[in-house]
Image: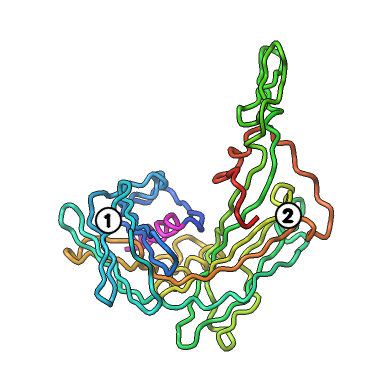
Amino acid sequence: MRMRSLLLFFVFLLTDACVDPLKVPNLAVEQGLVVDGAITDQPGPYTVQLFSAQSLDKDLDKRQYVGGAAVTISDDHGHTVTLTENATGTYQTDAIQGVVGHTYQLGITLEDGRQYESTPVLLEPAGTVDRVFFQFQENSINQNDLTKPQDAFAVYVDATGTPGASNLFRWRWKGIFHYIAFPELRTRGVGRTEIPDPPLCSGWIYTDSTGLDQVGPCECCDCWAPQYSTDALVSENDFINEMEFKTVRVAQIPIDKRLFYEKYHIEVEQMSVSQDIYAFWKLVKAQQQSASDIFQPAVVKIKGTIRCTSDPDEKAYGIFSASAVTKSSVFIRRLDIPKAIPQIDTLKTDCRTIYPGATNQRPPFW
C-alpha cells in the first residue's frame, strides 16, 4: 500500500505540467492504469491520457500509453460524449464544454474489457480574480546563500468566492517574456579559425567570395518564451473573510536580464476544485514545502478518484477533475525595477532554440 500510494503521488506530479516531478530511485510498484483527465468551463477540446504505472527507478517521462480504449464523459443531464484517440493513449473531446452546476464522470473501457470510472465531480464556480499585482523584493531569492542573493518580483492576487459554493481554489500561472538574439554572429570552427555561420533564419549568408551579406529580414532575432508555475498552490479556506482571499502570493519572478529585456507578462488562473482534488493539492503543497522524509504519512494518504468497476482488485491511479476557470493578468516592465540591471547578453543563435516553447510569433496582447 505504501508503494502504491507513493507511485500515485509521483504520477500526479508528472501529469500536471505546472508541477515539477520529484524522483526517488529503485521503488517497484504494482502495475495498473493511470488516468489524467479534466473538463473545464473553458472552450475545449479536453484531453484524457491513459498510461501504465511503472517502477519509480525508470524514466518516468517515457510513459507506456494505453491505446484502443473507449473513453466517455457524461453528465447528470443525460449527455454523454465519446472521446477520439488522436494519438496512442491520448483521447480528446469534440463538441462539449463544461457547465457550472453540472456533475461529470469519466468512463473507460479497455480493449480487454476492463472498465473504470471516476468519482462524479460537481463543476463549481471559480469566483473572481479581483486583481493581480506585484511587489519588488530585494535579495528575496537564495536568502540562505549569501553568495547568490537575487532580487525578484512577488506576484499576488486578490480574489473573491461565490456565495453558496465551496470556494476551494487552485491557482497556477503562465509567464511570457520577450528577448532578442543575434544569430548573424554565429560562427563555426574551421581549423584554427572561426568563420561566420549564420543560420538561414537570420537573413544573412556567408560565402568565401563575398563574405557576410544580409539578404533578408531576420526571422529568429525576436522571440517570446513561456514559463509555468511549478508550485502547488491552493486556497487556505480556514483563514478567509467573507469569501475574500487577500494578497495571496502566487509567483516569484527573479530579476533577470533576459526575462526583463523588455517586460514580463504573467497570467494567473483561478480554478475551482472538488474536495478530493483540493485535498490532493494540499498534500502536494505540503510535500513541496517540507524537507522531511519522502515517506512521511502525508504522502501515503494521497488517493485518486479512479476505480476499476469490473474488478475491485485491479489497481487504478489518477484523477479526473472538473473546474471552472477565471483569469487575470498583468505586465511587469523593466522600468518597474527600482535599480539598474545588466543589458541582455549576446545570444548568437536562433532565438527559438534557447528556451522550450519559444516562438518568433508576437503574442496578440503584447
Residue where numbered disc 2 is placed: 255
Quarter-wise, where is residue 120 in the image? Answer: bottom left
For the C terminus, the image quarter is: bottom right
- The three-letter amino acid code for the residue at tag 1 is Gly
Say which of 29 and 306 sits in front.
306
Compared with 127, 336 (above or below) is: above
Look at 63% across and 70% down and name the residue there: 249
- The three-letter amino acid code for the residue at tag 2 is Ile
Which portion, as a residue range, is magenta?
Answer: 1-16
- Residue 182 in the image, given as x and y percentages of width and height: 70, 34
Does the segment drawn in magenta span residue 226? no
Compared with 339, 236 (above or below) is: below
Colour mapping used in the image: rainbow
- Residue 28 in the image, given as x and y percentages of width and height: 34, 51
- Residue 215 in the image, given as x and y percentages of width and height: 67, 25
Look at 65% across and 70% down and name the residue there: 132
Q: Is residue 102 left or right of residue 163?
A: left
Q: Is residue 298 left or right of residue 340?
A: left
The residue positioned farthest toward the front in the image shown: 216
